[in-house]
Image (cartoon, helix red, strand yellow):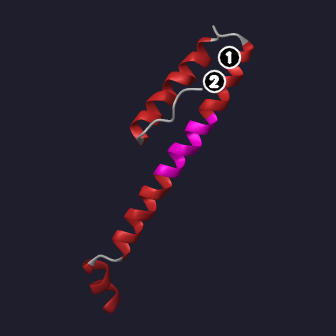
């Protein structure tokens, strides 16, 4: 398995590469299983990053002055 990507973009790019390799069907079964496991881990990591970003945006939006003004009406 490759080193862990350092950013969302790197993880996503590596996931694309893994999927392309698997879709090509030109790797032996043992390598395909390794790639599949790596892809699953990358997909989970990307999802965690996106969930964190979503939570940050939602928290920021909930605390915005416009929201507080609207809730006071």
Measured as percent of width and height from the top left, residue 66 is found at: 26, 78
Magenta segment's dominant SS is helix
Q: In the displayed structure, does residue 52 sit left or right of residue 60? A: right
Picture quadrant where residue 73 is located: bottom left
* Neighbourhood count class around disc 1 (C-alpha, 10 Å): few under 14, some 14–19, many 20 upward: some
Picture quadrant where residue 21 is located: top right
Between residue 26 and residue 67, name the one nearer to us. 26
Picture quadrant where residue 61 is located: bottom left
CA separation, marks 1 and 2? Answer: 6 Å
Q: Residue at x 68, y 16 (%)?
A: 31
SS for dot 2:
helix
* Residue closest to the far bottom: 73
Q: Residue at x 66, y 27 (%)?
A: 36
* Neighbourhood count class around disc 2 (C-alpha, 10 Å): few under 14, some 14–19, many 20 upward: many
Measured as percent of width and height from the top left, residue 52 is found at: 46, 57
Residue under numbered circle 1? 31
Magenta-span inclusion, residue 43? yes
Magenta-span inclusion, residue 47? yes
Residue 57, compared with residue 47, is above or below; it is below
Q: Residue at x 64, y 11 (%)?
A: 25
Q: What residue range appears in magenta?
A: 40-49
Between residue 46 and residue 30, name the one nearer to us. 30
Measured as percent of width and height from the top left, residue 50 is found at: 47, 51
């Amino acid at each position: 398995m490759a080193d862990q990507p350092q950013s969302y973009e790197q993880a996503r790019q590596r996931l694309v590469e893994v999927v392309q390799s698997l879709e090509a069907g030109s790797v032996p079964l043992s390598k395909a299983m390794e790639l599949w496991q790596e892809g699953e881990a990358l997909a989970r990591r990307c999802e965690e990053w996106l969930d964190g970003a979503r939570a940050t945006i939602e928290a920021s939006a909930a605390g915005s002055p416009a929201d507080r003004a609207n809730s006071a009406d």
